[in-house]
Image (cartoon, grey):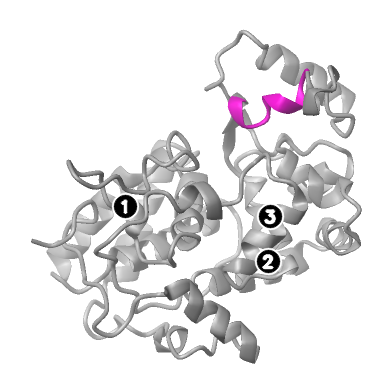
């Protein structure tokens, strides 16, 4: 049902002005929890100092949550004896991480302003701060989301873009939640930080599309390195930087990688190697203009964060992000 609300907004051409999303505001907690932003920022920084990779993980968490029934923190709910949630679905299992960081932030927030701030809003702020502490842009996060009381354990398998999806499929999945081709390319730029397991790209290294040969769009020096790092009989959980130029720094090097066929994931390289003139032009633009990338990335993050939020009396404010309130 919530997905249908987004599509209805699209029909009139105003996703951000949809009645549901319009209830979000940057000042939502200014009175009820004025210390919220500083609490989240302090603990996100602490987590990144402890493990630099956590910045990318918290950014990915927001993305994966929003694509399934909207930005409602349903991803954070643990499985129960009777309900299998989203955490253990194939696109999230061994991919989305940082739940313990959100737990730490939630505890600190509850100690400061009990039963006030949603887990969904904490995830959105943490994603912003993760980009900021990685050298990327900042923005004012729209707030006022509430938390889901239900999960859809099968939906992630169909709606979350996959590293092996072709560009047509990725564009369709973004369009289904109200996001444009510009959003596809700018949000993909989030791969300027983070890691990927060999399992997510080893289909490109030896027998691409059952051809008996590697993916011809993968640059030869990078291919040789990856074949050593991710051999056929190796550990598919081995981590490789998504951006070899500046793996932990949020910049536009990701797009330069695509121009030289150094995109790690098939879904990344397809932005430039496919016949889609619009995505290729955007890659060229962002490669030449870091400021344009930053502007478009911020706009797309705000737009993504506005996918079908629960507001008003819908959902609840969970006191523990892992379980619904009793």
Q: Which residue lies at the image location 70% right of the left edge and 53% below the top edge?
A: 169
Q: Secondary structure at mark 2?
A: helix
| Viewer-side residue, 256 vs 96 | 96
Q: Position of residue 57 (x, y in %)?
A: 47, 45
- Label 2 belongs to which residue? 183
Residue 166, placed above or below residue 175: above
Judge whether 192 appears above or below 142 on screen: above
Tell which circle, 1 or 2, labels the residue nearer the N-terminal end: 1
According to the image, label 1 marks what residue?
Answer: 76
How far is the residue under mark 1 from the one under mark 2? 24 Å
Cα–Cα span, label 3 and label 1:
24 Å
* Name of the residue lying farthest toward the top: 233
- Mark nearest the camera among 2 and 3 is 3
Q: How many marks?
A: 3
> Which quadrant of the rendered structure holds the N terminus?
bottom left
Q: Nearer the viewer, residue 147 or 210?
A: 210
Crowdedness of circle 2 by 10 Å Cα count: few (<14), some, many (20+)?
Answer: many
Q: Secondary structure at mark 3?
A: helix
The magenta segment is 199-206
Q: Tell whether 124 sits left or right of 84.
A: right
The Cα–Cα distance between marks 2 and 3, rounded to whole angstroms, is: 11 Å
* Label 3 crowd (10 A; few <14 / some 14-19 / many >=20): many
**Residue in view at x 68 percent, y 66 percent:** 183
285 drawn magenta: no
Marks 1,2: beta carbons within 8 A: no
Q: Is residue 248 left or right of residue 269?
A: left
């Amino acid at each position: 049902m919530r997905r249908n609300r987004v599509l209805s907004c699209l029909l009139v051409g105003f996703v951000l002005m949809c009645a549901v999303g319009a209830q979000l505001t940057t000042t939502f907690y200014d009175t009820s929890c004025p210390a919220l932003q500083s609490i989240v920022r302090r603990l996100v920084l602490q987590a990144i100092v402890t493990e630099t990779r956590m910045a990318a993980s918290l950014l990915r968490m927001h993305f994966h949550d929003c694509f399934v029934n909207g930005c409602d923190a349903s991803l954070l709910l643990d499985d129960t004896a009777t309900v299998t949630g989203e955490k253990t679905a194939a696109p999230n299992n061994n991919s989305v991480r940082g739940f313990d960081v959100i737990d730490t932030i939630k505890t600190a927030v509850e100690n400061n302003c009990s039963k006030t701030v949603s887990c969904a809003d904490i995830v959105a702020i943490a994603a912003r701060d993760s980009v900021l502490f990685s050298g990327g842009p900042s923005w004012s996060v729209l707030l006022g989301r509430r938390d889901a009381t239900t999960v859809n354990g099968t939906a992630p398998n169909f709606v979350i873009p996959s590293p092996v999806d072709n560009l047509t499929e990725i564009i369709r999945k973004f369009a289904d939640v109200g996001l444009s081709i510009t959003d596809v390319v700018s949000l993909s730029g989030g791969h300027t930080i983070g890691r990927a397991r060999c399992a997510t790209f080893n289909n490109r290294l030896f027998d691409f599309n059952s051809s008996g040969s590697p993916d011809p769009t993968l640059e030869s020096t990078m291919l040789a390195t990856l074949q050593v790092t991710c051999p056929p009989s190796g550990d598919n959980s081995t981590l490789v930087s998504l951006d070899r130029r500046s793996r932990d720094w949020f910049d536009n090097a990701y797009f330069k990688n695509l121009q030289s066929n150094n995109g790690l994931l098939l879904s990344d390289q397809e932005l430039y190697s496919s016949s889609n003139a619009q995505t290729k032009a955007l890659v060229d633009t962002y490669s030449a203009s870091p400021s344009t990338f930053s502007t478009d990335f911020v706009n797309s993050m705000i737009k993504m964060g506005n996918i079908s939020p629960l507001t008003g009396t819908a959902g609840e404010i969970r006191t523990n992000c892992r379980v619904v309130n009793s």
